[in-house]
Structure formats: structure tokens, C-alpha cells
Amino acid sequence: MGAVTRFDHVAEHARTRAALGDALPRLVRLVRAVPDLDVASGVPVWTVGDVGAHLAAVYLAYHAVAHPDASVEWGRIVPPGETSLSERVGAVNAASIGLLSREERARLGALLAERGETFLRDTGNLAPDTLVHAPWLGREITVATATGLVLGETLVHGLDIARGARLPWSIGPDAARLVLGQSMPTMMRMALDASRARGVSIAFDLAIKGGPRLAAVVDDGTMTVTRDAPPRAYDCRITATPTAFLLVSFRRTPTWKAVARGHLRAGGRRPWLARQLGLLVASPSRLKPPPRTGVRLAGWPRWRW
């Protein structure tokens, strides 16, 4: 798989911002080339326009958590009380597609450009390890993690739009590495199914070609994910190309297809345990129930910058 060097978190954050800056105009060109926003997308039940509306909400949401002076009534959207990650994320994503008016959807490309660029501009002066509270996740994350998540949303949902519109869209390995390195260590821990992981003890070595390399250790209902971990014995090693692992994680490519193409393989002392990782950690698609709600939350599009 090649040597993996210890990463510089400041430099990697800068590269992630640059990758997002490159992806945004590609996304805008893609959306503007779509002849019909009402066609089905790569996300079940959502149209291409729904995916674009969701992305517009994503850019606003991540801008808002990095700038608490933004006026957002999270209590109207995030379920109250002790709720699961799946319930919180599902509620926010179900609401997100109803936030834009028909007129706003008609100028979707311009809206995505404006909101994506605003996120980049207004987070540019924040250190990558700055902590921000993401209500739909129920906890704090770093600005670096948030930026990695926004890049991932842009790349994967760009693919969803392209598949629906039958237009080309590419996710390069360098950009996929940045998403995996910046967001996976945090999101894998958050998305662990604690009930399924109770009594389970497995150490996974996730080796992505060219980096990152992650040690994911499940121990009786908890998980730690460490980059560049010291040498240790692992139960299962999963090696993958970066784009394949990203798309399998988001359930945009079936695992069997990535394996058949030689882009994903399991090894180590107990290679059969590779399947357990997908059962223990919910993929982003499992955290995003896609039903249309018809709800329009008038307060969201009026967030203050």
C-alpha cells in the first residue's frame, strides 16, 4: 500500500479547504447543466433538486456552528431530549430538503456557490482545532472535522446529482483521502452502534493507499480511532484505495464491487471480521433517512451571516 507518513494537521486542513474550493465551482457547473431538477437522484426518494437543497442547508448549517451569532432555531429541528445520532441527523436531513422556495431552487447553482464560498471565507480565520458545537451530532467537533465533512458532502452528493442527471462527476483520490483523514476518526466513533458493540473486542487496521492509516479499536461498546498509531497487533487489516473506501462507506458502491475490482481487501489474523466493521459503525447513508416531509421551515433561509 506504500508508506504512510505522519500527517501535519494544519497543512492537511489547508489542503482540505483548497479541495473544497476546487469542488465548489465543479458542483455549480454540474447543477447548472442539469436540465430537470425534478428527476430522481442517486439518493432514494430524493430528486436532484432535493439533493441540491440539502447541500445548500449543509453549507449554512456548518457556517452557523462556526459562527454562533448566526440566528438558527435548532430547537425547532433537532429532536428534544436524549435521542440517538440517527434520529438527530435524520430529522435535520429530512427537514433540509424543504427549506428552499421554488424561486430559490430555480437559482440553485448560484445559491450553492454563495453559501459554499461563505463557509470557506468565514471559517478561514479559525484554527483547525477550534471546537464548535454541531447540534445535529449532539457534540463538539473541530473546524477541521467540519471542513472534511463539508467536502465529503460536496463530493458524494455531487455524485448523487450526476447519477440522476446522467452527467459526469469524478472524486479524485487526493480529495477522498482528505475526507477520510479529516472526518472519519471523529465520525466512526460517533456512529458506533454501542448496543451491537457491547461485549465485542476487535482491533482494525484501516490502511488507505497513500494515507490515512487508522487504528479503529472496538472494546465493549466503545471505539477509539487513532491516526498513525504505534505498532500493535490487529485482528483484521482492511486495505483500500481512497475513493473506493469513501464510496463504500457512504454506500454509493457495493462492497462486493470494490472487492471484485481489487480496490478493497481484508487480511490479517482474522480477515472475516472486516464485515463486522460495517455492522458496528453506521454509514452516513444509514444516518440520513431520505423521506420527503413537505415541511418548510421559514426561519432557516433567513439565517444571518
Image (cartoon, rainbow, N blue to C red):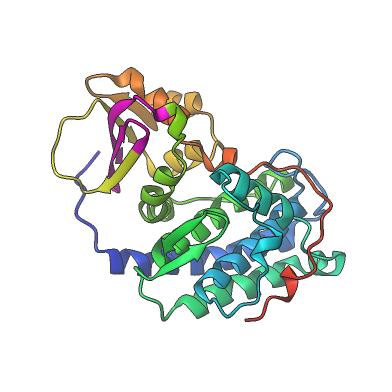
Going 54% across and 43% down the picture, which residue do you hit?
Answer: 284
Q: Quadrant of the N terminus?
A: top left
Tell which of 256 and 127 is nearer to you.
127
So how many labels did they put on this image? 0
Relative to 87, is 29 above or below? Answer: below
Relative to 104, is 243 above or below? Answer: above
Q: Quadrant of the C terminus?
A: bottom right
Tell which of 128 and 92 is nearer to you.
92
Tell which of 206 and 15 is nearer to you.
206
Residue 278 appears in view? no
Residue 49: % across, % down = 76, 55
Going 80% across and 46% down the picture, which residue do you hit?
Answer: 39
Most frequent secondary structure within the magenta stretch: strand
Going 24% across and 25% down the picture, which residue do you hit?
Answer: 235
Residue 15: % across, % down = 37, 66
Residue 136: % across, % down = 57, 55
Q: What stretch is highlighted in magenta?
A: 197-222
Residue 136 colored in magenta in the image:
no
Q: Residue furthest front?
A: 81
Going 47% across and 42% down the picture, which residue do you hit?
Answer: 191
Residue 154 appears in view? yes
Tell which of 102 and 220 is nearer to you.
220
